[in-house]
Image (cartoon, grey):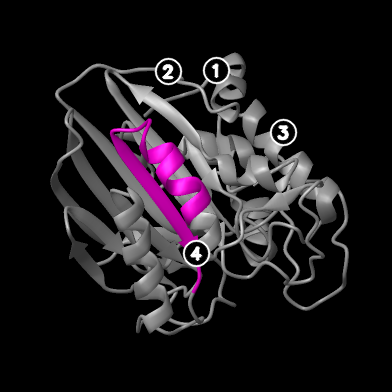
Amino acid sequence: MLRLPLAITLAILAGLAGCSRHGETVTLTCVGDVMPARGVAEVCQQRGVDYPFALVAPQLREADLTFGNLESPLTDLPTRFPRVNALRATPEMAGALSRAGFDVLSLANNHAIDAGRAGLRRSIEILRDAGIVAVGAGATQDEAERGLMVTLGSVPVGFLAYSAFPYTDFVHDPQRESLALLNEEALRRSVPRLAARCTVLVVSFHWGREGVREVSDRERRLAHLAVDLGADLVVGHHSHVRGPIERYRQALIAYGLGNLVFDEQSYGGNEGYVLQCRYGKDGALQGYEAIPVRVVDCRSRVAE
């Protein structure tokens, strides 16, 4: 597991190389939705903030880099609208995410703006202070689309993240705090630019329909386009259930990683994958394992 000092985190946000580890392979672990708000927050008040991750943290911490989708702002600021599914988690959860093993978290989703642009900005700062880098969001649209790169040993690993729900209670303004919006134009702008600098490029999509495993034609087309443009690993989330995994060209596509941590209000099976991938120094995928997990009482555990 890579822990990022503040100075290096800032460098990564600028698109520069970060920390490094040495080894013959690079191990990447990716998970789906991590939602530390609402019912999860209530359980954490009783059992501690590390409770939701305790049973899967060993799998997360053993990787060189661990990535997930943070499905809630981390801030003390209020939610903007009293809508039924507005989410907001306490800043203390950043420490729990760090201890669980997370290095990079996507904020490109339909809940990132629930506490307004100020809440989005504060979430990025809180994660950074905990040694976690946010991707898919930034002070401007250009920054949100820039992605980040970390060098592990001699292997540069890049991350990009996009949301397919750009206008959910959100008025887009490219000159203010923004999310990376999922469309072909954005992929063509960002993926080749970062792929040219990386040996391994991970592209994350927040997309699909809640509770639905099937992949739409549009989702398959965008996933294949990302690979054609240079992605080595494409991962999806938002459906809250496990989706299919596909080999396309030399890349791996996991259309739906489901949930890692959620409450009982999750649509679908409240299940997911911990996807563990091993890459050689040349960027070739040497192998992967999709470990099924299920969320019970707001706590993730390996499924039987």
Q: Secondary structure at mark 4?
A: helix
Residue 90: horizontal and vertical position, in percent? 73, 47
* The disc label shown at residue 8, or none: 1
Label 4 with label 1: CB-CB less than 8 Å: no
Secondary structure category for the residue under label 1: helix
User: Which one is in front in this view, the residue at disc 2 or the one at disc 4?
Assistant: 4
- Residue 184 disc label: 4
Residue 55 visible somewhere in the drawing: no
Q: Residue 19 — which label? A: 2
Left or right position of 57 against 164: left
User: Which of the 4 image quadrants contains residue 8?
Assistant: top right
Foreground pick, 210 / 99: 210
- Counting from the top left corner in percent of width and height, residue 299 is at 47, 59
Circles 2 and 1, Cβ within 8 Å, touching? The answer is yes
The residue positioned farthest toward the left in the image shown = 286
Residue visible at 46% across and 73% down? 240
Instruction: Give the residue type that dot 3 points to.
Output: Glu
Badge 4: few (under 14), some or many (20 or more) residues near its Cα, within 10 Å? Answer: few
Mark positioned earlier in the residue sequence (3 or 2): 2
Which residue is identified by label 3? 125
Question: In screen coordinates, is 95 left or right of 247?
Answer: right
Q: CA distance from mark 2 to mark 1?
A: 7 Å
- As helix, strand or loop, the secondary structure at mark 3 comes to helix
Amino acid tagged 2? Cys
Q: How crowded is the residue under tag 1: few (<14 C-alpha within 10 Å), some, or many (20+)?
A: some
Q: Of residues 153 and 183, which is closer to you in this image?
A: 183
Going from N to C along the chain, the mark reached first, 2 or 4, is 2
